[in-house]
Image: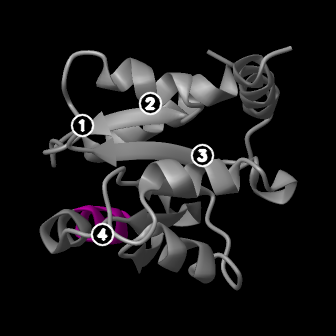
């Protein structure tokens, strides 16, 4: 079995029973992004919908926050200083106690093939920046629902 097959099998098994609430007031969301505007807009939308939100500006900071607070959703930028989103995702997927966390790439990597690359890496979803303010919560909810059915 190749490393990619192992990742795919782990990812598929993890999607069978996600521990993700459908009521936004039960969402605990970690936004990991190094651009203030992206953070502030996503945070405002989520907090308006009563989600619990924490912020990190790079992957190392995100992992440090998770030592004392565990989200059920992570919105993860891919290009950041110190530890990028690819690296943070890889670290998270090596932690069995963190496999139930939905990790969604929130990224400006929006060229042809970028979404496929993200999904092949085992992310649970992909939202391109700039994201739509009017559909942001719906986009996240759609990703979470796709996890419930193992799509």
Which of 21 and 40 lies nearest the eye of the viewer? 40
Dots 2 and 1: beta carbons under 8 Å? yes
- Residue closest to the far bottom: 68
Indicate the position of residue 27 as horizontal and vertical percent values: 55, 61
For disc 4, the neighbor class at 10 Å (few under 14, some 14 to 19, many from 20) is many
Quadrant where the image shows the N terminus = top right
Earlier-in-chain disc, 2 versus 3: 3
At x 48%, y 48%, the residue is 86
Report which residue position mark 1 lands on.
Answer: 109
Q: What segment carries the magenta color?
A: 42-49
Q: Nearer the viewer, mark 3 or mark 1?
A: 1
**Where is 112 relative to 126, above or below?**
above
At x 60%, y 46%, the residue is 102
Report which residue position mark 4 lands on.
Answer: 43
Q: CA–CA distance between discs 2 and 3?
A: 14 Å
Q: Nearer the viewer, mark 4 or mark 3?
A: 3
Secondary structure, mark 3, is strand
At x 13%, y 68%, the residue is 37
At x 71%, y 21%, the residue is 8
Q: Nearer the viewer, mark 2 or mark 3?
A: 2
């Amino acid at each position: 079995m190749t490393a990619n097959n192992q990742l795919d099998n782990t990812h598929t098994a993890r999607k069978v029973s996600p521990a993700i609430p459908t009521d936004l007031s039960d969402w605990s969301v970690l936004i990991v992004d190094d651009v203030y505007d992206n953070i502030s807009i996503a945070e405002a939308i989520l907090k308006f919908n009563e989600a619990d939100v924490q912020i990190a500006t790079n992957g190392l900071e995100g992992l440090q926050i998770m030592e004392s607070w565990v989200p059920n959703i992570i919105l993860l930028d891919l290009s950041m200083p110190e530890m990028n989103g690819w690296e943070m995702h890889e670290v998270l997927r090596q932690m069995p106690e963190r496999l139930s966390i939905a990790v969604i790439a929130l990224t400006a990597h929006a060229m042809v093939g970028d979404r496929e690359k993200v999904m092949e890496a085992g992310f649970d979803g992909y939202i391109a920046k700039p994201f739509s303010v009017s559909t942001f919560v719906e986009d996240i909810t759609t990703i979470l629902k796709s996890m419930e059915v193992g799509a």
